[in-house]
Image: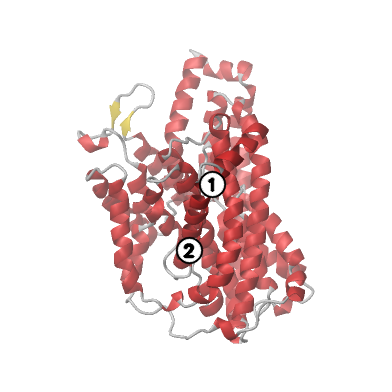
Amino acid sequence: MLESFFNSFPLLLGSGNFLTIISVIALGLLIGLFVGALPGLTTLMAMAIVLPISFFMDPLVGIPFLIGVYKGGIFGGSIPAILVSLPGTGASVATTFDGPPLTKMGKGRKALETALFSSVIADFSSDIVTILLIGPIALVALLIGPPELAAILFLSILIISSTSSGSVGKNMIMLAAGLFIAMIGQDPIAALSRFTFDVFELRAGVPLLPMLIGLFAVPEILINIETKAKEFVKTKLNLKKEEKLTWEEFLKLRKTILRSTVIGTTIGMIPGVGQVVAAFVGYAAAKNSSKTPEKFGKGELEGIAAPEAANNAVNGPTLVPLLTLGIPGDNITAILLGAFIAHGLRPGPELMSEQGSIVFAILLCMLIANILFLILGYFTMPLFSKVVTIKKSYLIPLTIIFAFAGSFVFRHNPADLYFLLFFGIFGYILKKLQFDVTPLVMAFILAPSLEYAFGQTLSLGDDNVLMYLLSERPIAALIIVSTPVITWKLFQRSKKLRDVATSLTSSQVKSS
């Protein structure tokens, strides 16, 4: 692994790639900042729509481009949250507690700089932790055989379903739906057709890209169309005339940023929890640790630093289970999984041993993205603060065009447009019924690997799989036996974290 790490530097710096990589990361950051600054248009939607663009690039260019969109979008959501109390992303909801009061006091620029610096420091730190952890975890993953992999994948699906937002009952329905959709097409072991209903387009299975764009982008577009197209805000903002964050003020925030970085990094390793919960937990921890908790919600810089550091610290650690085991921790890493697969990099135990240099080069690009993020974020802050005044009617038609074009260009198959429409309408209905599509997507992505590993386990066990597991694969047996306990413990932990977020939101609403 150490050799792969050092070999990543020539890949990153050689062959004239470096300037191209920097350029596309900067472009991704700008796209993410733009979309994040628009209330109603989510980072997830942006990622789904620009995903096909990355397919026409080299893996070392296309994937960092998506990472740039990801990082820019998470921070971009804090801009309208601070200036006009409209969170651009779910991760920025906690930022609305102290952001708008600071803006009313003429400290909008100071609040945005606090969010930027906190985000960059936390993101950079968690990315370093990711780089340090991914090698040892990958070495352990190489020791995993089909029985262990099947047990881990099954456990992962249950954890994601039990820790996702919404009721467990609805999540389990989504889990079953995802498993069923994944079985459409050919059996991965015997190559027999199943559930195709004599429809030729279903023989190859359901394509991942139109499904992702349909479930994540189209429902957001339809919900935005429902509301009358208008300016998000009519307030004229001029950040250039406002005072900036001083060095003394920043130093007072260092403990808060460090605490939230640890919180976000830890939560990032738990599948299905994500940035929103991390932001609320970071805010609650800062408030409980403060000597003046009564100032929170009235314009406190710690109330900006805490949630922004926590939600950005989630970004890096979510890639650890994705790259080493092929298990995406949330919807955005599911999109990144699609990008890796499209570029011929199949995440899993063998990825680090076969393509370790490329993986480390991509992870190093995350560190570069943070440096660019700091520079671009600082100098474009006044510009993106004006984005909140753009009318939705100008953007929605372009978003629709990109969604349809993106679904078509990868395979140039007209059937993909029908898949897009089906999953778009299906996703819209699910959103209206308050179903979380995360378990569906995760089950769909992990099911083929789970089925194949399970089939191999049955073959290895011959007529007595139970004895085979107990006698020759005790680790797999241990994982299976402990699955209910682990799932229950993580469900309780996730529920506790979400309860903290809910109670914090309720108390904030009452106080305002």
- Which type of secondary structure does the marked residue at label 2 adopt? helix
The numbered mark at residue 22 is: none
Q: Amino acid at mark 2?
A: Leu
Where does the image place residue 482, in percent across and percent down from the top left? 63, 34
The image quadrant that residue 277 belongs to is: bottom right
- Which type of secondary structure does the marked residue at label 1 adopt? loop
Image quarter (top left, top right, bottom left or bottom right) of the C terminus = bottom right
The numbered mark at residue 30 is: 2
Closer-to-camera residue (327/175): 327
Q: Amino acid at mark 1?
A: Gly
The numbered mark at residue 329 is: 1
Where does the image place residue 276, in percent across and percent down from the top left? 56, 61
The local crowd at label 1, few if under 14, some if 14 to 19, many if 20 or more residues have their Cα within 10 Å, is: many
Is 67 placed left or right of 209 in the picture?
right
Along the polypeptide, which appears first: circle 1 or circle 2?
2
Residue in view at x 51 percent, y 70 percent? 87
Regarding residue 245, the answer to whether it shows in the image is: yes
Closer-to-camera residue (181/103): 103
On screen, residue 428 above or below 99: above
Could you give the CA–CA distance between mark 1 and mark 2, rounded to whole angstroms?
25 Å
On screen, residue 334 above or below 136: below
